[in-house]
Image (cartoon, rainbow, N blue to C red):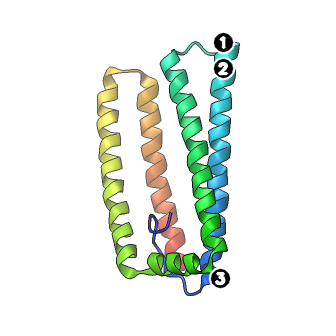
């Protein structure tokens, strides 16, 4: 998990350990989301509540399983870093490196542009599909833009 989202310099191992504890909590949240997704998929399959194809049921079961396993792996990585002082220091130094922070910032910028372009393409192509897809894509784009504006305002006051 180290280095994936390097956006800040951490001055002490104690401060970085707090971040790792937050990441561990978030990874447990991923486990919960995965279990809920898997449980809903299995419940609907066995009760016949939804008339969706086996493929879609398998996709939901796979997403639930993947989220849960990914969350568990991240949790154990975070805990192993927190418990080992040398790993904690090495991870803090790695994430606090200015080069890694710049790489992460640039990567997020590129991913944002690609995400917006791909959502626009799906939006345009969805004209030939259901109106629900058009509405969902429009809501996601609006949510993204609003989140960007609001977070920029909040961060401009913090920094």
Tell me the mark number nearer the camera, choosing from 3 and 1.
Answer: 3
The residue indicated by pointer 2 is 44
**Label 2 vs label 3, nearer the camera:** 3
158 displayed left or right of 98: right
- Which circle's residue, 2 or 3, is located before the other in the chain? 3
Work out whether mark 3 precedes mark 1 in sequence or the reverse, and give the earlier one: 3
Q: Which residue is mark 3?
A: 14
Distance in Å between CA atoms under marks 1 and 2: 6 Å
Q: CA distance from mark 3 to mark 1?
A: 51 Å
- How crowded pointer 3 is (Cα within 10 Å; few <14, some 14-19, many 20+) is rated as some
Q: Residue at x 46, y 72 (%)?
A: 7
What numbered label is drawn on residue 48?
1
Label 1 crowding class (10 Å Cα cut-off): few <14, some 14-19, many 20+? few
User: Where is residue 79 drawn, in percent x and y?
Assistant: 65, 65
| Relative horizontal placement of residue 92, taking residue 43 as reference (left or right) | left
Query: Residue drawn at (36%, 55%), measured in percent from left and top?
Result: 112
**Up-down: is 44 above or below 156?**
above
Q: Are marks 1 and 2 in contact (CB under 8 Å)?
A: yes
Tag 2 secondary structure: helix
Nearest the viewer among 7 and 148 is: 7
Residue 114 appears in view: yes
Residue furthest to the bottom: 11
* In the image, residue 121 above or below residue 111: above
Circle 1 SS class: loop
SS under mark 3: helix
Q: CA distance from mark 2 to mark 3?
A: 45 Å
Q: Position of residue 138 (x, y in %)?
A: 42, 38
């Amino acid at each position: 998990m180290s280095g994936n989202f390097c956006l800040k310099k951490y001055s002490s191992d104690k401060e970085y350990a707090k971040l790792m504890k937050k990441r561990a909590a978030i990874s447990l949240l991923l486990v919960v989301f995965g279990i809920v997704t898997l449980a809903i998929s299995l419940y609907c399959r066995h009760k016949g509540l939804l008339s969706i194809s086996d493929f879609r049921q398998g996709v939901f079961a796979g997403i639930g399983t993947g989220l849960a396993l990914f969350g568990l792996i991240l949790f154990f990585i975070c805990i192993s870093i927190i418990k080992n002082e040398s790993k904690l220091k090495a991870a803090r130094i790695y994430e606090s490196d200015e080069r890694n922070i710049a790489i992460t910032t640039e990567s997020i910028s590129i991913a944002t542009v690609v995400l917006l372009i791909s959502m626009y393409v799906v939006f345009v192509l969805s004209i030939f599909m259901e109106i629900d897809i058009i509405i969902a894509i429009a809501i996601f784009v609006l949510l993204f833009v609003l989140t960007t504006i609001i977070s920029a305002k909040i961060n401009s006051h913090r920094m």
